[in-house]
Image (spheres, rainbow, N blue to C red):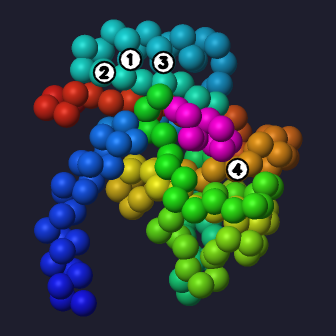
Amino acid sequence: MLNLWLMLSLDYKANFDRYHDKLHAEQVTLSVDGGTDTMQRFLSQTLESDRRTKDFCLDNCMHMTGSFQYNGGEVSSWFVFLDKETALSRSIGRAEMVEDSEFDSGIYLPVLYKTEDIDIGETVEISIGSHKAAYVVCGFFNSIMMGSHNCTLTELILTEDKYEELQTRVYAPTQRCVPYAWPINQTA
C-alpha cells in the first residue's frame, strides 16, 4: 500500500495535467441562471472581451442542490445535469466515458462514486432540491473539474430521455453551463 501511495502521490500533478490537456478541461465553470438569448449574448460578450479568456462554450444544462447516498453517508453538492451527447462532445470541459453499458435510459456518474452499492445496473436515488428521482446507473465518466472534488459543482450525465423528463418535471431549472479557460500562465 505504501508503494501505491508513493506512486500516486508523486504522479498526482503530472497526471492531473495530462488529463487536463487530454479532455481540454476548463479552469472555471459557471452555472448561470437565465437561459435566455439576452443572457447568452451578455456572457459571450463578457468572455470574448476579457483578454484572459482562451476558450469557452455555452451549453444548456440544469442545476440544483442535491444529494445521494454514498459509501455509508451522503454526498451533498451543487449538481449540474447535462445530456450525454453534450457532455461528451463539448469543445471544452468534456467528459470521458470510463465505463458504459447496454443500459440506454438512466444516469452516468463520476467514476469516483463507483462503489459496491453504486454500480452499473443499480438504481440510485437522487434528491434534487426537495424532490427525489431514481435512475439506473448506465456507466461512469471522468471529468477533471466537475467529476472530482476539485470543484463544488458535480456533473451528472443523463440519457436524453431522462434529461427531457427532468426538464419536464422542473425540479432543476434550465441554465447555461459556461466552462472556460484562461491560458495556464495567467491568473484572474
The secondary element bearing badge 4 is classed as strand
Determine whether label 3 and label 1 are within 8 Å by CB: yes
Is 115 situated left or right of 108 in this image?
A: left
The secondary element bearing badge 3 is classed as helix
Whole-percent x, y for residue 20 in the image: 32, 45
Query: Marks 3 and 2, Cα distance to the nearest angstrom?
Result: 12 Å
Occupied quadrant, residue 50:
top left
Query: Marks 2 and 1, Cα distance to the nearest angstrom?
Result: 6 Å
The secondary element bearing badge 2 is classed as loop
Based on the picture, tell me whether residue 166 belongs to the magenta stretch. no
Determine whether label 3 and label 2 are within 8 Å by CB: no
39 or 14: nearer the viewer = 14
Query: Marks 4 and 1, Cα distance to the nearest angstrom?
Result: 28 Å
Q: Quadrant of the C terminus?
A: top left
For marks 3 and 2 on the same chain, the one whose residue lies earlier in the sequence:
3
Magenta extent: 82-90
Which residue is the site of mark 1?
47
Query: Marks 4 and 2, Cα distance to the nearest angstrom?
Result: 29 Å
Residue 170 seen = no
Given the image, on which type of amino acid does mark 3 rest?
Leu
Which residue is the site of mark 3?
43
Front position among marks 4 and 3: 4
Front position among marks 4 and 2: 4
For marks 4 and 2 on the same chain, the one whose residue lies earlier in the sequence:
2
Residue 158 disc label: 4
The secondary element bearing badge 1 is classed as helix
Query: Marks 3 and 1, Cα distance to the nearest angstrom?
Result: 6 Å
For marks 2 and 1 on the same chain, the one whose residue lies earlier in the sequence:
1
Crowd class of label 3 (few under 14; some 14 to 19; many from 20; radius 10 Å): some
Query: Marks 4 and 3, Cα distance to the nearest angstrom?
Result: 25 Å
